Image: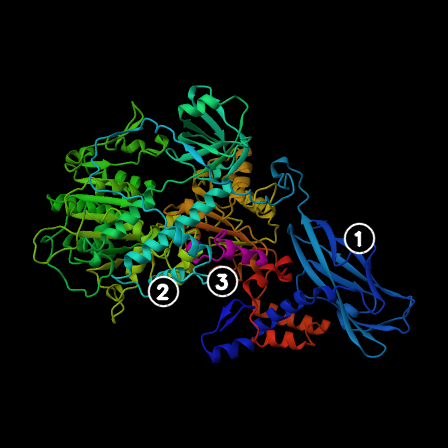
Amino acid sequence: YRCELCNYTCRNANTKAQHLESKKHFVEFLKYYLWQHEETLVRDKHHVTLSCNEVEDCLPTIHIDIQKEQSVKLTLQVSLSRESQSDVLLQSCTLLHPFPVVILEDECGVVARDQQVKIFPGGIYTVVIVCCSQHAGKWRIPLALKFQSAEGRIFSIVRYLEVLCSDGVKDDLYDLEPSTLYQAVPPLPRLPDADKIVRADKPKSAATQELERNVELNIYKIPDELRELQKHGLECWDDMSEDYAQLLSFVRKHLDDPLSEDSYWGFFSTLLFLEEIQMSTDIRRYDMVDVPINPRPTQTDLFVLEVLGLMESRPSVLKGDRVYARLHSDSSDCVVEYEGYVCDTMVSCVALQFGKRFSKVYIKGMKFDVRFTFNRLPLRLMHRAISMVESCRLWDFVFPEIANPSAPALRFRRLNFFNKKVEKNAEQFTAVKNILLGLHRPYPYLLFGPPGTGKTVTLVEAMKQVFHLIPSSKILVVAPSNSAGDLLAERLLEHLMPSQIFRMYSSSLNPARVSKKLLKCCNYVPNTKTFWFPARSKLEGYRIIIATLATGGRLVSADFPLNHFTHIFIDEAGHALEPECLIPIVGLMSPWDPNEKGPGSHLILAGDPMQLGPVIRNRLAKDHNLGVSLLEQLMELPVYQRHENGYYNPQLLTKLLKNFRSHRDVLHIPNQLFYESELQVFADEVVTESLSCWEKLPSRGCPLIFHGVLGRDLRESHNPSYYNPEEIKVVVDYVMALLDGKGGLRTRVREEDIGIVSPYRKQVLKIRGILQKRNKGGVTVGSTEEFQGQERLVIIVTTVRSNPDLLSKDIRHNLGFLRNSKRFNVAVTRAKALLIIVGNPWTLSGDHCWNKLLQFCIKKKAYCGVPFGDVDEELHEIERRFARANIGEELSPEDRLVFEGHIPITQKTLQEEPRWRDDI
């Protein structure tokens, strides 16, 4: 049973009964009741009216503007019409939430002493509303007045007090109000399919291609039938044909049955197609209508298209992508589209190369309709990989069953470590030793590296040892991102010659992103600004090749000899799709055969399944676990589980335990939530304690701050992304105070020492803009994804959202990290010496992970900002206040059914209701 009121799942009848009797459930029901009956409750009734002298319109909300630390008084008049035949008794006047910013005062003690006041026809009783706050923000509190008529009838009238408190500081740098009010842009009608496409000549490649393409790579077109099934959410529909019904049954069986050798290809090919359908839909949201395309002044054969959202990857456009343009004014029966290739990307525009026919029809000032596409190559490589798993007999890599130790790949008495720290670290030592021995074969070896535990250091040491101790070894190193590959290559160069390493970049990479440290050993040629892909015979001579997972597919296409690579290392494996991980494996390596000798067939996956996984767009694909990485899937299998003694099998998996990054208080909650409290603090105390005596810490010695802010989440113009002005001010104030270098800091904090994390792009851009105006552009501001694998002395997280109703939309639209435990984990584990959380404590307390951190900060006296009390005490007080106001006391049959859990409340209902607690 799932209680939609409380967003809580009950596992059995006993837990359901306990939950329905809990105070939390009752209070959630009271809030639901308030929302459900709001129209009736706010209505003036029985000749009683509420008005406010200082506010013209107070139905249903009294808007109050104040400044920090300044008190404002308003007069609420409770009037009984002369038309009333009898008097009424005012029995109570109650704020339904115990938030101390608003105080009520009255002459006869109705507010404070539960006195009752009789109001006669034509009479007025006055209640004074006093507002004062030490903190900027916005909140909305229901005020309930309970009456009794002369006949004994009890009734209530509710008004909402909406208070906006500003700090009163006039600073042009803090001009954060929306430039224009937000207006949702209705989606453009999708451009109809063109009748004819005029193809462009492919631009002269920026790559010198000598590498063979001997293994075919098919197109893998999405079946039209699957498009139709996806349109109906893989459910039956009216007038469904028998053929479609059979196909749907077949597809559902593949997706719903446990993953096996028989269902593997069908399962992943279907999910990849579903994901591609969603990608195709998403990219069309960026169709442009009636826009100019102008010749590029410096290159007359190229044309420039302005794409305003390019810097935010809205849309994501890369070199080599195709863009299609049609004349906006074309009203002919035959719609013609002109294909253009992206030759260059700039801050807010792209340079396009069209064919000669485009140049012939082009007239300056023409307007065009434009649609974008995405590069299908990675998807095609994934389809090829899963289609080859059976023929390449890779089942031991994806479905390991029995852990039988294999023969060691080599024998050694003692290891001479390049990094002596690895030798002294028991878990790192074990990992390097077992990777060398290869006793994990024929299965993958997993290196589980929680944040700050030295996963990269361990991998690099293992690669160097393989390189030196196994002269016949050939190593392929792959990762989902270029940054991860560059880091490994740079570390390897510390002990290896450039001639022994080949860093192979994709030809679509912006040359500006090529690591300058790797110019001597990579395939980028600075003189010609081109990428060079040597012939297979040349590549076979390198001992180590480093590439992304997708670029590794070039080696498969080149038909390298099977098991040419004795070792394949996949770093950040938890961040890649399972089919993506297989791209550089199928055709290059087969599981170890015990009848054969030699050091080959070593597959090593490194990463952390508790951190960010792959990004999945399609809901059906996500529901069927396309977003579960190969690393995460393997760790769920019995052979990789802990033994009865509580330890993993070290021949198959090593979990690194010593954290060299964070202060113990910063690490405490993620360690408890994600790592079974096994991580040990080994960070340098000179670093981690350097900010522990900062004067702005609520609790000296504890480098945590949870700064509660009841801000506004705003949007402006046509941008759907949110930002929170009140949180921005708090964040920037912390940055300036840290960079000021005063107040008990034991070390000088530099701009590059500070990282600011936010889930919303608009918040990121607003903060960047203010910091640049203050000449502090060296502070890194970005999303959680941008910080994966990084660390900073100080991390400030601004959560932006300040309304649990809108928080529910976060779940539905996958916005931000408020309900994503992996994003939470990454965000809070980047900090070495200081972690600052800025956000709405009521909003964040609704999530398990954030609430754990919030309660820990309260326990450590590290909370500051808006008053936030004990949750249980707050629930008790809310219950008492509702009862005093007689709201929720008399239930209709429908209300009682909802309270007793017999009528489920849909997620849609919960997303649309304006929960009052969020607005305070």
Give the CA separation, mark 1 to mark 3.
55 Å
Give the CA separation, mark 2 to mark 1.
59 Å
Q: Is residue 493 part of the magenta span, yes or no?
A: no
Highlighted range, magenta: 804-823
Q: Residue at x 58, y 77 (%)?
A: 900
Vertical order, 705 against 792 (above or below): below
Task: Judge from the rendering whether residue 338 lies leftward or rightward of residue 163; answer left or right.
Answer: left
Q: Which residue is mark 2?
A: 256
* Amino acid, disc 3: Asp
Q: Which residue is mark 1?
A: 55
Give the CA separation, mark 3 to mark 2.
23 Å
Q: Which residue is mark 3?
A: 238
Vertical order, 374 against 325 (above or below): below
Q: Is residue 806 part of the magenta span, yes or no?
A: yes
Predominant SS of the magenta segment:
helix
Badge 3: few (under 14), some or many (20 or more) residues near its Cα, within 10 Å?
Answer: few
Residue 90 is at least partly visible in this image: yes
Residue 832 is at least partly visible in this image: no
Q: Position of residue 575 (x, y in %)?
A: 35, 50
Q: Secondary structure at mark 1?
A: loop
* Amino acid, disc 2: Asp
First in residue order: circle 1 vs circle 3: 1
Quadrant in the picture for the C terminus: bottom right
Q: Position of residue 614 (x, y in %)?
A: 37, 51
CB atoms of marks 1 and 3 within 8 Å:
no
Report the disc number at residue 177. Answer: none
